[in-house]
Image (tube, rainbow, N blue to C red):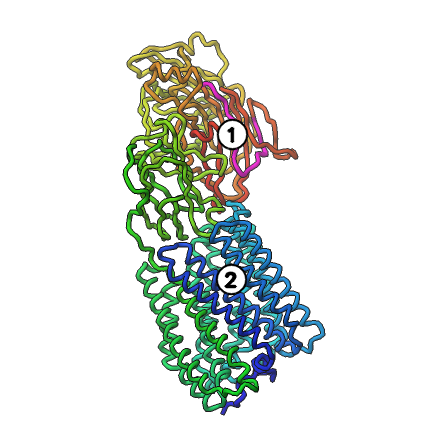
Amino acid sequence: MHSKNDDLAADGTRPLSRFKASGQRGRHLAAHGLVAAWAVLALLAASVQQTLPVARWLAIHLFLLGAATTAIVVWSEHFAVAMLHTRLPDRRWSNARLAGVNIGAAGVLCGVWADLPFLTGAGCALLVTTVTAHLVVLVRMGRGALGGRLAPIADYYRAAAAALIVGAVLGWLLATGRGGPQHYTGLKLAHVHVTLLGWIGLPVLGTLFMLWPTVLGVRMAEHTTRLARRVLLLTGGGLLTAVAGLAGGRRPAAALGMALYASGVAVTGHLFARTVRRRPAISAAAAWMLAAAMGWLAVGVAVDLGLLVARPLAEVQDDIGSLVPVLLIGLVAQVLVGALTYLLPIVLSSGPKERAALRATLEQYWPLRLTVLNLGVALLALPLPHPADTAGELLAGAAGAAFLALVVSVLVRGGRGLPRETGGVRAARRPVLWGTAAGAVVTVLAVLVANSGGSTGGSDVAAGAAGGGSGATRTVTVTLADMRIRPARIEVAVGTDLRLKVTNTNSQRHDLKVENGPATPMLAKGQSRVLDLGPVTADRQAWCTLPGHRAAGMTLDIVVRKDDTATPSPGKTGHMPTGHEGHMSAAATDGGLDLSADFSAGWRPRTADLAPAPGGTVHKAELHAAHTEIEVAPGVKQQMWTFGGTAPGPTLHGKVGDVFEITLVNDDTGMGHGIDFHAGSLAPDTSMRTIQPGERLVYRFRAEKAGAWLYHCSTAPMLQHMGNGMYGAVVIHPPGLKKVDHEYVLVSSELYLGTPGSTAQVTKMRQDTPDAWVFNGIANQYTQRPLKAKAGERARFWVVAAGPSDGIAFHIVGTVFDTVYKEGAYLLRPDQAGGSQVLDLATAQGGFVETTFPEAGHYAFVDHDMRHAEAGAHGMVEVSE
């Protein structure tokens, strides 16, 4: 038979009784009223998430940052008082800290909602200040306190406060974009881990050391205190390592930290399993719910560890969303339900008989409710089709609603049983209990609803401005992925009826809101919506409304041109992977090219990889001069004059001393062509002469010197022959050149559209006003089809400036060149202290640079003459881990 004082802790302390007798009823009524208010707001935000996509983010943060933070601040202080056997802090300062926490949280949420960075920063600063003060109070409590077997649990509350401080700073960096788009993934993962597993997870884990044996009605194991300290060392130290690794983009360190955290959870689970005895628990329902919550914590941590071990951080960010229901519903909500199932009968009853009756009420159908709730969590967490998500939400919601109905019944019944006289502890605590219960009830409901993702409704077309425009209709494909909107800029002629076909290709949800215009719902991976903007007459911006995403770079500029040159053919679509902000933003050139459009079906980029040099010392090749139609920009085909059917022609590769025997065959039916190899040294009279259609010429030269050399048509007017594609590169390795992981060849040139040799085209050539600047003959090809490399790999970029009129300032965003070789000489070697940022080449010059990619990411390479970069001389190296 259980003692009537079965609310006592196993070591004889009375944390609940000490709290009930603390005389703080006014403060606790206010605190729990705040918890209830935060939870109600979270509930309201969750209810409108179908129409306001950002509302789901707000609902979760209203619960975690508002309700949960308020509750943890209050209860951690009072549990620390009880466990350390010390006095309560000064009431006025406690109230001030509580107010500061709530005002700071409100400032953060309002600042993010209204996109006011100053308010967000002020709220974060106030939150950090007040939580730091809370941490100081918890630390000072331990000085000179009597302590007890439960004293180490107070360390969990201190560690949690430190975690919230770190989480608030990381949240500020994310919300304001101060962390930079290149660090967004790591900072977000660090923020999620430190808040969910630190600020929420550590207090829950620590409190369970007391609550678990109390619910079972057994004495605390003798070695609990020692294990509690060890677990905190593992979980706290592991979390610190994981957060530091994630913030720095170091996946191995993050995985090591989570392995330590997981080992701490495993030690705790083993202790709790050994605590179970054959005799019935005081509350079997509470015990099973707490056990299930502990199980979901273990599952969540194990899955998280597996993701960090097996996948790049970008993919972990996409998949981490599946762990949110595990931790919010499986852990937090279920711990709350289990705790209330045990505690409410104790605090509401007037004696053992009434306590048993209230407990029996709360435990009605508990096996079924437990099964339904955890089945719902499993359906939400597993990677199942959308109907499974909906079923999971319904099951979890049904279990939560059933428990809330029982709680209401217990509250009404327990309230009637309380004495009505104003004296005594029971009368004094009536408002406290009702405030506590109300806050807890609404919080449970908020957790269940706020987590539900829901399917995003809405029609396929979101209407924009009413009325039709007089201009052409244009549809642009817009892709949401990798914290970018692609294209990042769309240029249209004034009055164009613009439609955006928006598709999210990320596992993470995104939306798109157009300034003073329509918006998509929140889109899951693969979902699409069409936004009809109507006639566009002024510049506008569009962005993802999720907090922090706009600041991190998820924006789209819609720019109105006053002339018609920017208007591509009706119906042309756009898709362009983003580059470095500020290094590439234009989606259309001055000549009217839409660089954000799709290439034709079946198009393939020209390989930039330098093929190995053929064996032997004599290299023979046959080049056919001919007119060839080539797709020179997305969706734009142009007749080019080519060597070997490509513009530029094939790259020739060898070493110093090799002999090249090139046979030029003129397959052109209307004009003569010749060839000039800068890598050879011989009289041009015969070898570089012009041959007529149908003729052949053997050009033989020895590569006496190393370098990156140009070859081109030698027939006048060379401006036209080169400007229409008759050029290429010869790469001769310097002696002793070391092997690298990748060797690329990039030939820069200008692109002139129009009929080859026409007056309009020749005028553009003479005035040096090309339609685009390109690498390897095609504008933006390596932006849509990035070069591939891995972190830590070394790459060599051979660059030749073919012109015919402009040179190049070759630069790779995010890297420093440690080797520079220009025009046959090393300007920089790896063993020197200096570095280089640009390989500057005049027309017809060549060389190479080398660099090592430090980490996974997207590294844009550009001609740092921004006119050229924004008009096609732009590409990307996609670096994976």
The residue type indicated by label 2 comes to: Leu
Magenta span has 839?
A: no
Residue under label 1: 864
Helix, strand or loop at disc 2? helix
Spot occupied by residue 70 in the image (x, y as percentages of width and height): 54, 67
Spot occupied by residue 751 in the image (x, y as percentages of width and height): 40, 23
Q: Taking 367 as reference, is 327 above or below it?
A: above
Q: Is residue 2 left or right of residue 395?
A: right
For the residues carrying marks 2 and 1, which lies nearer the camera in this image? Answer: 2
Q: Taking 880 as reference, is 704 above or below it?
A: above
Q: Taking 26 as reference, is 801 above or below it?
A: above
Q: Taking 169 as reference, is 285 above or below it?
A: below
Q: Quadrant of residue 52?
A: bottom left
Residue under label 2: 65
Which residue in the rendered view is the most extreme toward the front? 422
Q: Is residue 491 left or right of residue 276?
A: left
Which span of residues is magenta-colored?
804-821
Spot occupied by residue 641 in the image (x, y as percentages of width and height): 35, 19
Q: How many marks?
A: 2
| Camera sees residue 73 | yes
